[in-house]
Image (cartoon, rainbow, N blue to C red):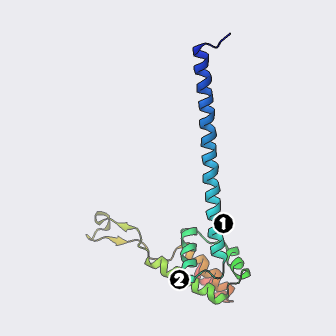
Amino acid sequence: MSKSIRRKKRDREIRQARSARQRKASMHRQIAEEATRLALERMDRICDPETPVPELARLLVDQYDGEPIPARLVELLQERGSSPERLASVAEAMLAIDAAEPGTEVPDSEAGDGDQEQKSADPSLTVLTFSAAAARAAGDTEKARHLLD
């Protein structure tokens, strides 16, 4: 006995839906694998003592984007061969990057004086926490405390 046209149509729709779900799941897996691969490459570049200081500073600023850097990161960098002097250089480069990036501008109507103003020029939490950890690694606990206060 042959299947009815309605039954064939329904079976085809079920197969197409299943195939679409499988393609979507495969695409999500590929995206997740690529994101993981890029994150691992970025961490390898961060931990590599041969990474130039300006590049390392940019990687850290981009990676943490204003969020605090885990203190363990500086310990890891030291374990992988970074000296306290190199960490201090990275902290200075991060500060320069942070200062060079334009802040959020306030439109004239909100600024009140007709010009556009920059919001606070204070260093980001990323820069402050890394600088404090680098100072601590160099043995300057007073500077580390000052930066975190």
Amino acid on which the number 1 mark rests in the picture: Leu
Task: Pinpoint residue 8: horizontal percent, then vertical percent.
Answer: 60, 19
Q: Nearer the viewer, residue 25 or 136?
A: 25
- Is 135 left or right of 107, judged from the image as shown? right
Picture quadrant where residue 113 is located? bottom left
Question: As drawn, is 108 to the left or to the right of 79?
Answer: left
The residue identified by callout 2 is 93
Pinpoint residue 145: horizontal percent, then vertical percent: 63, 82
Q: Secondary structure at mark 2?
A: helix
Q: Would residue 96 be found to the left or right of residue 40 on screen?
A: left
- Camera-side mark, 1 or 2: 1
Residue drawn at x 40%, y 68% as measured from the top left: 104
* CA distance separating discs 1 and 2: 23 Å
Q: Depth check: give the residue in front, 121 or 20.
A: 20
Indicate the position of residue 39 as horizontal and vertical percent values: 63, 64
Residue 19, label in figure: none
The amino acid type of the residue labelled 2 equals Ala
Image quarter hosting the C terminus: bottom right
> Going 37% across and 68% down the picture, which residue do you hit?
105
Q: Residues within 10 Å of mark 1 (few under 14, many from 20)?
A: few
Q: Residues within 10 Å of mark 2 (few under 14, many from 20)?
A: many
Q: Residue at x 62, y 23 (%)?
A: 11
Compared with 29, 118 (above or below) is: below
Find disc 1 in the rendering and name its residue. Answer: 40
